[in-house]
Amino acid sequence: MSGRGRLALCATAATLMTAGSLLPLVDKASWFLTAALLVAVQAGVGALARRVPLARTLTVAVQALVALLMLTAVFAGEAAVGGVLPGPEAFQEFARLLTTGAEEVGRYAIPAPATEGIRLMLVGGVLLIALAVDAIAVTCRSAAPAGLPLLALYSVAAGLAQGGAGWLWFLLAASGFLLLLLAEGRDRLSQWGRVFGGAPRARGRTAAAGYETAGGSALAPVRTGRRIGVLAMGIALAVPAALPALDGGLLSGTGGGSGGGSGGGTISAVNPLVSLQNSLNQPEDREVLRYRTNSDSTKDLYLRIVALDQFDGAAWKSSERRIEDVPDRLPRPQGLGPGVRTTEISSSVSAAGWYAQSYLPLPYPVTRVDIGGRWRYEPAGRTLVGDRGQTTKGVRYTASSLIVRPTAGQLAAATPPPARLLREYTKVPGSLPEVVESTALSVTKDASNDYERAVALQDWFASKGGFTYDTEVQSGSGTAAIARFLRDKEGFCVHFSFSMAAMARTLGIPARVSVGFTPGTAQGDGTMSVGLRDAHAWPELYFEGVGWTRFEPTPSRGSVPDYTREETPAVTPSDPAQAQPSTTDAPSAAPSVTDSCPPQMRRQGECGGPAQQGGAGPTDTGFPLGPLLVVLGVLLVVLVVLLPLLWRIQVRTRRLGAEGRTPADAAARTLAGWREITDAAWDYGIAPDESQTPRKAAARIVRLGKLEGASGEAVHRAAGAVEQVLYSPRPPVAGSLAEEARLVRAGLRAAAGRGARLRALLAPRSAVRVVWAVSARWAAAVNRWDAGRGSVERWAGALRRRPSRQRG
């Protein structure tokens, strides 16, 4: 393979290796196969265009045109002329898909579904980067600047994945770029011929086929480049690994606590809004967790991730708090008195292999956690957070927790909370609009205690206030978002929970917001499946003697606690939990089907029934073979027709190229030029005669080709140079016969008719040498095979004839 061919191959490989960093962004990888095929075809078209050769700008233009045809066939074939040629309708389809894809990128969480719009953005983007890399590194022969588009591609992937691209994708991208640099270095080195120094090469070898190395000396700079590249990549990977992690996340990504050793360290605030809304808007309800519990009922078994207890006017977030080692058994929940009925249950949880975030989903209040890995405990929020990169990805753990069953009377008779807790959890920012407090006072005007006020707020949001559940509403937890929500009365769980917590604080009731998952859906094997659409936020209000207590203001989501109903059913504490789960009462977190279910809920399949089992959203439509095969078929036909022409151009360029500087190189160059002249004559119908001397062969070409003037003289000059190389004891160092070959070819073309010129161009007779070369290589391979098989047979026969050492 020529140096430029190797460079083109390495440029394609570097682009695809870098494009691999986009794979974690989408849940299906079939788009990558489409992109790889289109990039390979685009690179092949560029290689053919450079063989012709075409001008640099024309080469890039041809590649861009072929890329457009392929994208049209794959994504807009129905709107294109003949399924391939783009017209106004095809460009309108492209615009529609790109607009839709941009909206879907902002709507879905990672990994996003492989919709047509997202697939077009991915495939088209990779194709555009591949074109830029090929144009810079191969067409313009400057590999170093080609790292800029590769860096842009990787940066987009790493930025969207929020660090999820990982060290493996960085290693692949860096290796691809390093491979490209090494290929360019080797190509540049080859243009200088053999490196001076080292052991002398064997006699009789020429440089007609390309440059040679002298004792491997030419590869020394390449080996040095490899070592430097490997060392640089090692440093790039090792240094970040040694630095402390600075990332964070809630429903996606990694991060969490800092600090090591036993005890100490802090966790910082997180904002769950974007991740929570993206989870609710996923077209497919991917499973996040699966658990098995011995509780007799799961409707109150919310899986809590983190508590947001700080409201600064811009957002609700969790406070920065101290973390410590996880105790064997967690202390009794804050505020929970001995008179409240509780039941301790056990749940075995396993997280999905793709779900990686730093807070551990746990039922509240958890009393004991059995889990491996680096986890720390935050006492105020009663949460577990991963330390030094620990995430929930694929973890399995067992959690013991309490089912707390207070009565309405116990909540109504709650005494005032401690002063410190009251100050911390009733803070509201000065920017909070007056409408929030006035509305809270209006809704709770008939209540006589904090419990009745909390229930009044819950019922007003859930049923009496005329609110509508809609996950497409703009998210936000600041004061302006709360005021807008109270005015428009449209939102999802974030708006309901944050607004109720803010209103409770204005009434002097300690409140915070918890984020996590509703209990999930019961499965046939007795387990509960928790999906992305079970992501939820709910308010927790504090009552002395009971502790932090869950309320459910969001309509059609989760379950309303029994202690907030008018008639609380009598419930007695169950016996200690047994090992086997019970499925006699396993209500799902999915809402019941009612006529009042909002249209948004119906579209998402959250109104119960069959739709709850998995939303029907946009999915990967698969590999579009039909239109793509049409384009590839056309390209294949064109390639077959042009193959002889391309082969002749490649051979002519190699024969007449200036390679090598020694006398032996000059001799080989002269013989290659003579071969080109005889093949050019052959293309115009003058078959070579190997039995004639160069002088007689030249006279024959001049006579049959009707060459006159400069072209005839060029043939004789070339024949004289060949005779000097073949017969002179000390042949002079001849120059290249490129000019003579050009003159001869021009003379033959001028003397030939139109049909002969067309055949010499598109179907040159000398192309039969390809068949001869293939036949010769096949025969050599068969001979080697026969020789090897004969050696094996002789070896086996010798073993059979080997005398036995056993004695009779």
Image: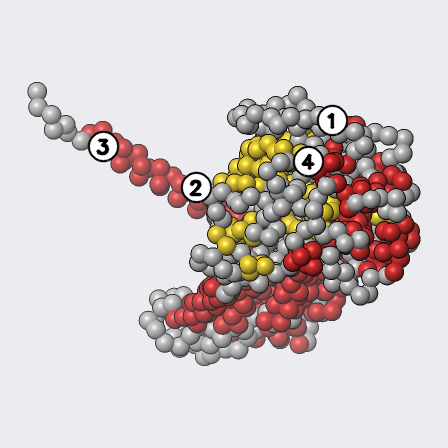
Of helix, strand and loop, which one carries label 2?
helix
Of helix, strand and loop, which one carries label 1?
loop
Q: Compute the Cα span from label 1 to label 3.
A: 90 Å
Residue 213 occupies quadrant: bottom left
Of the residues under marks 2 and 1, which one precedes in the sequence?
1
Give the amino acid at mark 4: Pro
Residue 691 x, y percent position in the rendering:
50, 58
Of the residues under marks 4 and 2, which one precedes in the sequence?
4
Q: Are marks 2 and 1 in contact (CB under 8 Å)?
A: no
Instruction: State the residue position of label 2.
Output: 782
Q: Where the C terminus falls, by quadrant?
A: top left
Q: Residue at x 64, y 23 (%)?
A: 583
Of the residues under marks 4 and 3, which one precedes in the sequence?
4
Give the amino acid at mark 1: Pro
Q: Compute the Cα span from label 2 to label 1.
A: 89 Å
Vertical placement of residue 635 versus 803, above or below: below
Q: Nearer the viewer, mark 4 or mark 3?
A: 4
Residue 306 seen by the camera: yes
Q: Nearer the viewer, residue 717 or 140?
A: 140
Q: Nearer the viewer, mark 2 or mark 1?
A: 1
Q: Compute the Cα span from label 4 to label 2.
A: 88 Å
Which residue is farthest left? 808
Q: Are marks 4 and 1 in contact (CB under 8 Å)?
A: no
Residue 236 x, y percent position in the rendering:
50, 66
Q: Residue at x 14, y 27 (%)?
A: 804
> Is residue 384 shown left or right of residue 114?
left
Instruction: State the residue position of label 4.
Output: 406
Instruction: State the residue position of label 1.
Output: 569
Residue 724 x, y percent position in the rendering:
46, 74
> Is residue 649 shown left or right of residue 808?
right
Callout 2: few (<14), some (14-19), or many (20+) C-alpha neighbours within 10 Å? Answer: few
Of the residues under marks 1 and 3, which one precedes in the sequence?
1
